[in-house]
């Protein structure tokens, strides 16, 4: 074992570690471990005083290695590495033992066991750290272009912030227009200003901005590279329209004979044509031909749009285009899908005509929607005299989603207000708890209480058309236990609106995998830290904003969009990033040239040098997984910072109390 | 530590990949899920880095079992490292079987970053299984056949290189 001067620091983390681990005993015990020069315990190692303690010891005691036993390295490894670096010690000569998440927090009732485990983990780190080698982070330049995926309000905000700062942005949107869910909404709570009025100027800014390349009707197909230096391939789906010729006059969709239900923008409530522009304020203004429903693509006849187009912009032969960009950072703002209430059969959505989803209701009350803003039943003429609004549909329900969707209470209150304002009928809100915790929200709730809206506390058990009592005929009966009066109630209404919650996009897991980030149990993307780093992810250069990170409303999405942009701008502004020097190198003198590693590498980072008959790792492509290291039959590939010796020493370290003589000595 | 089998407390060494299972373990901690304190974990970047010799090293030096945890198939941060691990660990387990090491002593499992609960369950189950097996007794196993002992020596020599 090499001789080094190791400093060991055991963190109390207030009561978090010290509550279950006898930290003083561990620190005292660690003094007896090989190479340990200093061993201390301290209340909060991550505090500036804690870090100074390490720095002073490095300088005064001449420490050559440092071990901190505290929280997860995902939390504070960077903090302590930086502290070592400040004191002149190479940051990779530092090792962390996770005695909080992996010991005190999981064995809280067994101080002896938690302390023993902490000792084992500390011993592992102490044994390993003496084999650690100084490493230098590779500094690479950052491409100034940022990719923003998703053109909803979060993505729009992020794109505009970066573009306004003078850097190029590529904004990719799957649908034919940007705008996202916000473009579907009529009014926004709690100010009741019109959604389109505040959104469309921003959409227009995006379209006009010289620094933004807008790619709608496009999807990211491939992502290669690493922070600062991604290469992203985008499939620009064929619109079948020559954008250069199209003026967006609208003749084509006026003449198109094929009508189909618009499941996206109109949420199934209205129709669009086969060649269509999703909504009047769409950005860009060009329509798109939906080849799945277009008569020409189905039968080979029609081409009416082509006949009437005044500029000859229709191009039936247009093909998908693959475009590759060099990208420095990525912001994912991919939004959400609405919970499908068909999954709750007792609510009758899809079976009972006058049960609507919240997005259908949004479209219905929107002046540019399918009913021109008329609040009517499914027959298109009857004005409802009574409306039930059911909260928490698919949210806060263990059968579907356990989480609260955060926006439904407020938009349900908004709906209640709109019913009162437009048709003046009776409104019943069926709620479990009213959650109005943001600026101006509680005041809005009080306003609704004064407007005479009924609030019934309880989860609706059933919505049915089967009348049992006089007055119920021809109505929808909402059945619920009113928990405030302790009685079952049956309330007959004309219309039911289901306040459906937010769910992760159906393909969030695939998108996450494409960009190398993970989803939480709920399916939303995981942030680097839930409180202190909500827009970054564990993968450097990939940021998240808006509902793809978790349910939130418009102001929060805008804030995250801007926050993610600020994070990206700080990277671009610096001009370069430091890459983890965890990568593989081949000892060419001893390489037999068998080429097994070449086939193992998932990034094709290993080249075979024909002249020398050896393999060589391209450090810019290597991501440091170590698959080749484990595969090399000659053991001549070194995986930096996870070398054979380091891990073997750590194994010996964690087994300090049971280590016994091997039965067969190495020959 | 008593080895009479009754109050035998096994020692397990865990190899956790940085991206999924180490964070599953972190999540188990953040969620304050209790699980047996028998696992002593080591972080590696990917299960594709898992050198089978480390399993032998741990077993030789006092571990009663080894757990290797990675991302679910198809979810590897490095595309396919976990597939490499499946092949290597299964091959190693066949060798270990011939040396008399019970199957449950070396286990390969998956836990994604969101599966703190599953992580805790895996540790609980593996600890129970190894506890039921009792201490690993290389000597007894190897004395059964001198050929096997020689084979083990060859393996361990590779590791000492």
Image (spheres, coloured by chain):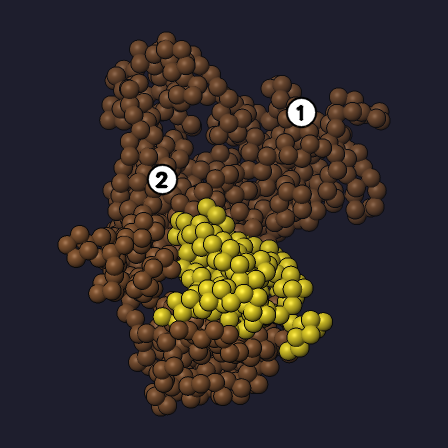
Chain colours: A brown, B yellow
Mark 2 sits on what residue?
A220
Callout 2: SS: strand
Specify the quadrant of the image occupied by residue A278.
top left
| Left or right: A181, with A352 as reference point | left
Mark 1 sits on what residue?
A351
Q: Residue at x 74, y 44 (%)?
A: A458
Location of residue A180 in the rendering, given as x and y in whole percent from the top left corner: 44, 37
Q: Residue at x 69, y 71 (%)?
A: B5
Q: Is residue A156 visible?
A: no
Label 1, residues with CA under 10 Å away: few <14, some 14-19, many ≥20: few
Q: Residue at x 81, y 37 (%)?
A: A489
Chain under callout 2: A
Using the rendered image, report if marks 1 and 2 lie on a common chain: yes
Label 2, residues with CA under 10 Å away: few <14, some 14-19, many ≥20: many
Nearest the viewer among A577 and B4 is B4
What's the CA distance linking mark 1 and mark 2? Answer: 37 Å
């Amino acid at each position: 074992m090499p001789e080094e001067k190791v400093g060991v620091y055991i963190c109390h983390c207030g009561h978090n570690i010290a509550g279950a681990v006898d930290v003083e005993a561990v620190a005292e015990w660690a003094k007896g471990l090989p190479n340990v020069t200093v061993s201390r315990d301290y209340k909060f190692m991550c505090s500036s005083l804690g870090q100074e303690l390490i720095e002073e010891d490095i300088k005064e005691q001449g420490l050559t290695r440092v071990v901190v036993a505290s929280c997860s390295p995902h939390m504070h490894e960077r903090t302590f590495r930086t502290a070592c670096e400040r004191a002149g010690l190479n940051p990779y000569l530092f090792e962390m033992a996770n005695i909080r998440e992996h010991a005190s927090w999981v064995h809280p009732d067994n101080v002896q066991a938690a302390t023993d485990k902490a000792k084992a983990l500390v011993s592992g780190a102490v044994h390993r750290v003496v084999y650690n080698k100084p490493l230098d982070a590779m500094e690479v330049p950052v491409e100034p272009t940022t990719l923003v995926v998703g053109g909803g309000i979060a993505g729009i905000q992020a794109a505009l912030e970066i573009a306004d700062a003078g850097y190029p942005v590529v904004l990719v949107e799957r649908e034919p227009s940007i705008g996202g869910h916000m473009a579907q909404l009529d009014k926004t709570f709690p100010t009741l200003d019109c959604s389109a009025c505040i959104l469309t100027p921003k959409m227009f800014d995006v379209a006009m901005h010289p620094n933004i390349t807008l790619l709608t009707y496009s999807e990211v197909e491939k992502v290669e590279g690493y922070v600062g230096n991604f290469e992203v391939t985008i499939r620009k789906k064929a619109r079948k329209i020559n954008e250069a010729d199209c003026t967006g006059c609208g003749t084509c969709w006026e003449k198109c004979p094929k009508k189909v239900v618009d499941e996206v923008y109109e949420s199934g409530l209205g129709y669009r044509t086969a060649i269509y522009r999703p909504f009047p304020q769409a950005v860009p203004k060009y329509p798109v031909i939906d080849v799945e429903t277009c008569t020409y693509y189905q039968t080979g006849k029609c081409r009416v749009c082509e006949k009437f187009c005044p500029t000859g912009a229709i191009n039936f032969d247009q093909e998908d285009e693959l475009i590759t960009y060099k990208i420095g950072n990525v912001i994912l703002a991919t939004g959400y899908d609405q919970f499908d209430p068909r999954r709750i059969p007792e609510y009758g959505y899809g079976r009972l005509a006058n049960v609507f989803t919240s997005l259908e209701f949004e479209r219905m009350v929107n002046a540019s929607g399918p009913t021109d803003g008329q609040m009517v039943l499914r027959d298109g003429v009857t004005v409802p005299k009574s409306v039930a609004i059911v909260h928490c549909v698919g949210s806060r329900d263990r059968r579907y989603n356990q989480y609260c969707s955060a926006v439904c209470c407020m938009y349900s209150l908004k709906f209640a207000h709109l019913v009162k304002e437009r048709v003046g009928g009776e409104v019943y809100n069926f709620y479990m708890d009213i959650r109005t915790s943001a600026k101006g929200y509680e005041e809005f709730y009080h306003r609704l209480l004064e407007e005479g809206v009924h609030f019934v506390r309880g989860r609706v058990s059933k919505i049915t058309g089967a009348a049992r009592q006089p007055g119920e005929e021809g109505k929808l009966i909402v059945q619920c236990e009113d928990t405030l009066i302790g009685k079952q109630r049956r309330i007959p209404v004309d219309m039911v609106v289901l306040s459906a919650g937010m769910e992760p996009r159906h393909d969030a897991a695939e998108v996450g995998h494409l960009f190398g980030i993970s989803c939480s149990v709920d399916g939303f993307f995981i942030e680097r830290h839930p409180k202190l780093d909500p827009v970054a992810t564990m993968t450097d250069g990939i940021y998240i904003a808006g509902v793809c990170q978790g349910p939130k409303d418009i102001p929060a999405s805008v804030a995250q969009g801007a926050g993610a942009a600020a994070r990206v701008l700080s990277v671009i502004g610096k001009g370069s990033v430091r890459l983890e020097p965890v990568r593989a190198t081949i000892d060419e003198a001893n390489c037999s040239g068998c080429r097994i590693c070449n086939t193992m590498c998932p990034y094709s980072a290993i080249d075979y040098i024909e002249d020398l008959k050896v393999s060589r790792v391209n450090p810019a492509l290597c991501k440091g997984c170590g698959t080749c290291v484990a595969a090399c039959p000659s053991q001549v590939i070194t995986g930096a910072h996870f070398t054979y010796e380091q891990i073997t020493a750590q194994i010996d370290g964690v087994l300090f109390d049971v280590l016994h003589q091997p039965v067969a000595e190495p020959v | 530590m008593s080895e009479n089998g009754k109050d035998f407390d096994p020692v397990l060494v865990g190899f956790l990949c940085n991206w999924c299972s180490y964070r599953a373990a972190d999540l188990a901690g953040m969620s304050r899920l209790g699980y047996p304190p028998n696992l002593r974990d080591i972080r590696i970047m990917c299960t594709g880095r898992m050198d089978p010799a480390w399993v032998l090293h741990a077993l030789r030096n006092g571990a009663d079992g080894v757990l290797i945890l990675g991302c679910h198939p198809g979810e590897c941060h490095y595309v396919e490292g976990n597939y490499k691990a499946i092949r290597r660990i299964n091959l190693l387990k066949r060798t270990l079987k011939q040396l008399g090491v019970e199957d449950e002593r070396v286990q390969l499992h998956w836990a994604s970053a969101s599966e703190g609960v599953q992580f805790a369950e895996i540790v609980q189950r593996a600890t129970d299984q190894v506890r039921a097996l009792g201490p690993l007794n290389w000597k007894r196993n190897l004395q059964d056949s001198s050929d096997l002992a020689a084979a083990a020596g060859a393996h361990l020599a590779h590791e000492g290189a």
